[in-house]
Image: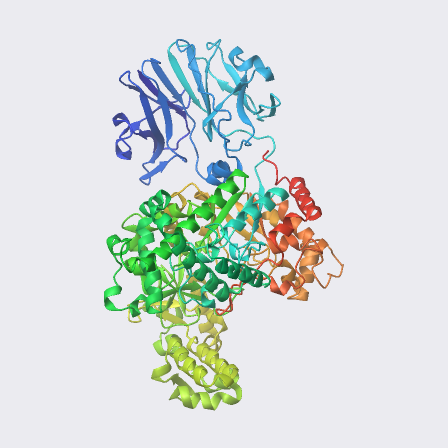
């Protein structure tokens, strides 16, 4: 059998095409051994022919562009091409391919969000086998990847040949969706000796008609009348006449869901109610916050969803007790019902009582169901598949409770090493119940969440998860694989609109060099696990894959951080650019008497005497026991413990001392003994900077701008291109990146190249010279939203700054010369909502608070109670809860119909 590869492609000098695949003749997937293609100048086609044994052909292959100018090897986009030809069926197979270019917007329609949820194929529909009739003639296998076909529709082909209906619509040939999202059909042409003109269409089987014929010129199949020949026509991209697909979604944390059957907090089973509401209103996505277990202290501190004790385990808070089994003991069942009524009356998530109730009844159910649970084949399969993370998690959770802390460094020495499978999974051990409880909760959490996921997919709704950028310091992950992290450092974020002193998340930073040694296996495992539950994913602080804001372990605030990795300045370079170098003046806290008076007022002298010592005339340095913010924090924790009545004054002094520690202009690079330096972020706001002479200020500012905005652009671009592909291509989820804040110029280009959607928040425009963004300017591969969980809602923001609100009312909403209403009235919220719906962005996702804001009867009375997180407050408790049950929201027929109409009118409800 002859196998011929053909592909039209225009190359530049020094470039050539090869084909690589699973056959030895194609290099057995070794790019260096790939089959060279030869260019035909008269046709512009690259081609090559192989002679193969006349046996069944199971072919997988892809094309590569080799660039001799830079040594680059560029694979075409997409999954491996696959072709199957039965033994003895054809004497010749001609593959007529087209190059699949990366970074094309339509590529993202091949992700799980579309193929498993939005455009899922119902079982049995359109799955007729490929025709093999009349194989002695010239057979054309029409193939087209087209994920954007509604669940109830099919793809068809119509053309000039009689076998393609002679352009008669009712005779169109319907393609099989057996290999969806690729559609395929074999057609024996009536007159293969003449050119065939054809187009693809969307076929409505119920109405037996084409509802959309692709736009543009006819496709052309050149003559090819050879008998016993299979021509595989790999076409690309259905040309939709209705423009690109766009959808809308709702964002709400699972803990904030309220249902009449809950226990004071949202549960995985409640997701189905939210999906019902989304489907009713034309919303296509439900976006949630991280759902991993954060149980470290059994206190309110654990309410922070970005500090998971395992990046794999699910939070027991979301467990539906009723979905496991009824409690056999009537008294316990009555107690549970009373608690449900009590906790459900609260307008916030009362975290500690909720968790106490969950654990109490989970233990009772475990003992009640233990025998059946341990014997369950489903549990045994779950344990076998998930044991790599599940077993250490069960041990960690049991020992956390046994020793009263999640800090494994404080456990007895013999427990600091993670256990083996055999040590934990011994059903007959007297200690087993300590571990069995956590196996039990994780099994049922997994089942309940996966049930909700399948429910969402069945109803054509995408469930979008959230990937935190960091890991918790006292977590299973840090315990079992400490070599993957820099445990002596802290991750955070530089100063921004959320926090003028930056954010210190206290998470360890990643040891990327070590992670690269096994091809980022930890990341790939993490993403694969998340794809068990989600078809789309938001990557929190995606900038961390380019560079993370890294803070030394002795800092409390985020100002004394530096980007890592980075290209620090050698002290000789600083000296050359400033004209001088004085280490104490540039790198140690600059403290003068007049600063103490400014910061501490009447307490300045007392602060000087207790914490400082003289280093010159009216100049001071810290005493040894308070040289770092962590030392200061420890001193004041003791003061606050013994003198709680003076808490406000003590915190004011403590924060003033933190400010003095921040009075430096350069920070040392780790382990370089002052040889390499980083300019301190926002140094222009320091006394130290302002009190330099004018010429030095000018030179230092130039160093600063060069360092933060020019020096690292290509360096950080390469960092992202190395690390992000491991995340992007680990699964087929639709990936969205939270790219807010101080964004390097290279980030949007890298995200676009990898098909990662960006985020556009109207109040945080990417252009620093613009006060407000506009959804109209968002690119297609993006998500637009009026806000996020880290911001006040639209109604809350409207009341924060009257002058800013007036400018927004005039400049963005177009009410020039009118007085903005004092409150964000429903009609104002709707105007803002409509702006986002008509954006060209693929997705418009709204916090549910902002959707309810357009209805005066449904929205919460006090908008200040709607903000989920306050980033500037590290002690913030995450307790927001929807103020009305989802059952009531489902019954709000007038509002739901109105919202659905808005989705339809904006084109965000339709498939085409």
Whether residue 710 appears in this view of the structure is no
Asked if residue 431 lies left or right of residue 783, the reply is left
Q: Residue at 46%, 50% (x, y): give it.
A: 325
Q: From the viewer's perspective, is 416 left or right of 581?
A: left
Residue 636 visible in the current orientation: yes
Q: Residue at the far front: name it.
A: 330
Image position, residue 499 (x, y; %): 51, 67
**Whole-percent x and y of residue 554?**
36, 73
Of residues 712 and 177, the one drawn nearer to the viewer in this rendering: 177
Q: How many marks?
A: 0
Nearest the viewer among 309 and 517 is 309
Say which quadrant the N terminus sits in.
Answer: top left
The answer to which image quadrant residue 905 occupies is top right
Reply above or below: 611 against 47: below
Q: Position of residue 779 (x, y in %)?
A: 55, 45
Q: What is the x, y in percent for residue 610?
A: 41, 89
Q: Residue at x 58, y 23 (%)?
A: 205
Camera-side residue of 513 and 175: 175
């Amino acid at each position: 059998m002859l196998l011929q590869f053909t592909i039209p492609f225009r190359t530049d000098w020094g470039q050539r095409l090869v084909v690589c695949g699973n056959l030895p003749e194609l290099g057995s997937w070794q790019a260096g051994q790939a089959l060279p293609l030869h260019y035909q100048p008269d046709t512009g086609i690259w081609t090559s022919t192989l002679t193969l044994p006349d046996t069944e052909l199971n072919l997988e292959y892809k094309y590569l562009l080799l660039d001799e100018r830079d040594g680059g090897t560029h694979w075409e986009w997409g999954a491996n091409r696959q072709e199957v030809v039965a033994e003895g069926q054809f004497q010749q197979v001609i593959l007529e391919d087209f190059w699949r270019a990366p970074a094309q917007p339509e590529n993202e329609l091949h992700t799980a969000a579309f193929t498993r949820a939005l455009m899922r194929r119902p079982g049995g529909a359109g799955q007729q086998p490929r025709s093999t009739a009349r194989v002695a003639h010239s057979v054309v296998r029409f193939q087209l990847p087209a994920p954007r076909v509604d669940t109830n529709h099919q793809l068809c082909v119509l053309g000039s040949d009689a076998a393609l209906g002679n352009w008669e619509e009712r005779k169109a040939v319907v393609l099989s969706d057996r290999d969806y999202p690729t559609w395929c059909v074999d057609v024996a042409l009536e007159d293969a000796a003449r050119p065939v003109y054809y187009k693809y269409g969307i076929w409505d089987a119920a109405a037996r008609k084409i509802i959309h014929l692709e736009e543009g010129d006819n496709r052309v199949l050149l003559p090819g009348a050879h008998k016993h020949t299979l021509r595989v026509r790999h076409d690309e991209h259905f040309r939709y006449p209705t423009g690109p697909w766009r959808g809308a979604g709702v964002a709400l944390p699972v803990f904030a869901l309220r249902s009449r059957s809950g226990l004071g907090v949202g549960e995985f089973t409640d997701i189905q109610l939210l999906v019902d509401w989304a489907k009713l209103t034309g919303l296509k996505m439900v976006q949630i916050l991280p759902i991993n277990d954060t149980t470290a202290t059994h206190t309110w501190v654990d309410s922070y969803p970005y500090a998971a004790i395992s990046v794999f385990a699910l939070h027991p808070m979301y467990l539906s007790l009723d979905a496991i089994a009824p409690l056999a003991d009537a008294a316990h069942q009555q107690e549970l019902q009373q608690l449900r009524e009590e906790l459900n009356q609260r307008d916030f998530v009362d975290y500690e009582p909720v968790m106490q109730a969950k654990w109490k009844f989970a233990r009772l159910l475990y003992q009640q169901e233990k025998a059946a649970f341990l014997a369950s084949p489903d549990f045994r399969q779950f344990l076998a598949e998930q044991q790599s993370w599940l077993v250490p998690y069960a041990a960690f959770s049991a020992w956390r409770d046994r020793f009263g802390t999640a800090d494994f460094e404080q456990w007895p020495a013999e427990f600091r090493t993670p256990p083996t499978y055999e040590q934990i999974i011994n059903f007959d051990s007297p200690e087993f119940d300590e571990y069995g409880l956590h196996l039990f909760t994780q099994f049922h959490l997994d089942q309940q969440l996966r049930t909700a996921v399948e429910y969402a997919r069945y109803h054509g709704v995408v469930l979008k998860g959230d990937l935190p950028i960091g890991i918790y310091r006292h977590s299973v992950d840090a315990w079992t694989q400490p070599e993957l992290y820099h445990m002596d450092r802290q991750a955070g974020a530089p100063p921004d609109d959320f926090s003028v002193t930056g954010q210190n998340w206290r998470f360890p930073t990643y040891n990327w060099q070590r992670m690269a040694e096994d091809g980022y296996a930890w990341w790939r495992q993490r993403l694969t696990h998340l794809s068990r539950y989600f078809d789309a994913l938001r990557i929190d602080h995606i900038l961390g894959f380019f560079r993370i804001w890294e803070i030394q372990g002795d800092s409390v605030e985020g100002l004394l951080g530096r980007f890592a990795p980075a290209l620090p300045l050698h002290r000789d370079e600083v000296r050359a650019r400033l004209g001088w170098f004085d280490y104490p003046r540039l790198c140690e806290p600059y403290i003068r008497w007049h600063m103490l008076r400014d910061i501490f007022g009447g307490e300045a002298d007392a602060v000087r005497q207790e914490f400082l010592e003289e280093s010159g005339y009216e100049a001071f340095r810290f005493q040894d026991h308070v040289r770092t913010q962590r030392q200061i924090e420890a001193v004041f924790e003791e003061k606050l413990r013994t003198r709680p009545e003076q808490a406000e004054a003590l915190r004011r002094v403590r924060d003033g001392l933190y400010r003095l520690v921040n009075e430096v202009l350069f920070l040392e690079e780790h382990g370089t003994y002052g040889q390499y330096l980083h300019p301190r972020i926002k140094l222009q706001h320091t006394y130290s900077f302002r009190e330099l002479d004018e010429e030095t200020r000018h030179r230092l500012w130039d160093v600063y701008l060069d360092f933060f905005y020019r020096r690292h652009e290509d360096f950080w671009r390469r960092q992202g291109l190395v690390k992000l592909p491991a995340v992007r291509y680990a699964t087929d989820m639709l990936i969205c990146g939270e790219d807010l804040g101080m964004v390097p110029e290279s980030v949007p280009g890298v995200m676009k190249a990898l098909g990662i959607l960006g985020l556009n928040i109207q109040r945080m425009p990417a252009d620093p010279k613009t006060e407000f963004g506009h959804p109209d300017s968002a690119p297609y591969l993006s998500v637009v939203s009026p806000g996020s969980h880290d911001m006040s809602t639209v109604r809350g923001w409207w009341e924060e700054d009257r002058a800013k609100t007036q400018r927004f009312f005039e400049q963005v909403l177009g009410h020039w010369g009118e007085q903005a209403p004092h409150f964000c009235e429903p009609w104002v919220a709707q105007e803002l909502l409509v702006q986002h719906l008509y954006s060209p962005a693929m997705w418009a996702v709204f916090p549910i608070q902002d959707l309810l804001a357009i209805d005066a009867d449904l929205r919460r009375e006090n908008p200040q109670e709607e903000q989920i997180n306050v980033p500037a407050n590290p002690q913030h408790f995450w307790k927001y809860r929807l103020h009305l049950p989802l059952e009531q929201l489902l019954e709000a027929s007038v509002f739901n119909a109105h919202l659905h109409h808005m989705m339809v009118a904006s084109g965000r409800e339709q498939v085409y």
